Amino acid sequence: MTPELRRSPWTPWTGLFAGAAAWFAHQQFGANANYWDCHFGGVLWTLLLAAVCGLVTIAGGWMSWTARAAGRGEERSDTRRFSAAVGAATAAIFFLAILFGTLASLIVPACAR
């Protein structure tokens, strides 16, 4: 991560915002794919969507986690460390939500015959 990005006041919250956006995208595009065309919302679409949204969530959580550590010659406040921990923890929760939604969509068939 670049020093400018590490110093940004938004970096500790990246896990929260990226995780929420990825979970929203996973829920909306995964559920609506069955309404658009139930054969389209099958296993391949479900796994591809989960992989992309999961990677976005993991990347946001990693950015939050690394923003809590002080760089060389930098002072980090308790507030920044707390917000970075909150961002990383919520990214983990959103990742679990994506994982459980993916497992549910693999268990329940997309097309009821």
Image (cartoon, rainbow, N blue to C red):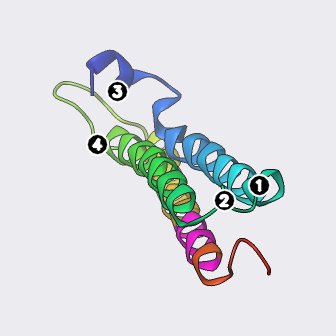
Mark seen at residue 69: 4
Q: In the image, residue 11 lies at what x, y percent?
A: 46, 32
Residue 39, above or below 107:
above
Q: Can residue 100 be found in the magenta stretch?
A: yes
Q: Nearer the viewer, residue 34 or 76?
A: 34
- Quarter of image, res 13: top right
Residues marked 1 and 3 touching at CB (< 8 Å): no
Sooner in the amino-acid sequence: mark 4 or mark 3: 3
Report the residue that reaches farthest toward the right: 35
The extreme top residue here reads 4
Query: Viewer-nearest of labels 1 and 3?
Result: 1
Dot 2 or dot 4: first in sequence order is: 2
Q: Are marks 3 and 2 in contact (CB under 8 Å)?
A: no
Q: Which residue is mark 3?
A: 6
Q: Mark 2 falls on what kind of element?
A: loop
- In this picture, residue 57 sits left or right of residue 75: right
N-terminal of the pair, mark 1 or mark 3, is: 3
Q: Looking at the rendering, which quadrant does residue 27 occupy? A: bottom right
Q: CA distance from mark 2 to mark 4?
A: 41 Å
Q: Nearer the viewer, residue 50 or 62?
A: 50
Where residue 52 sits in the image (x, y, percent)? 47, 47
Label 1, label 4: how far apart the Cα atoms are: 46 Å
User: Is 109 situated above or below 102?
Assistant: below
**Vertical order, 112 against 24 (above or below):** below
Q: Residue at x 68, y 82 (%)?
A: 108
Q: Is 90 rendered above or below residue 9? A: below
Q: Was residue 99 drawn as part of the magenta stretch in this picture?
A: yes
Q: Which residue is mark 1?
A: 37
Query: What amino acid is found at the position of numbered circle 3 in the picture?
Result: Arg
Tag in front: 4 or 3: 3
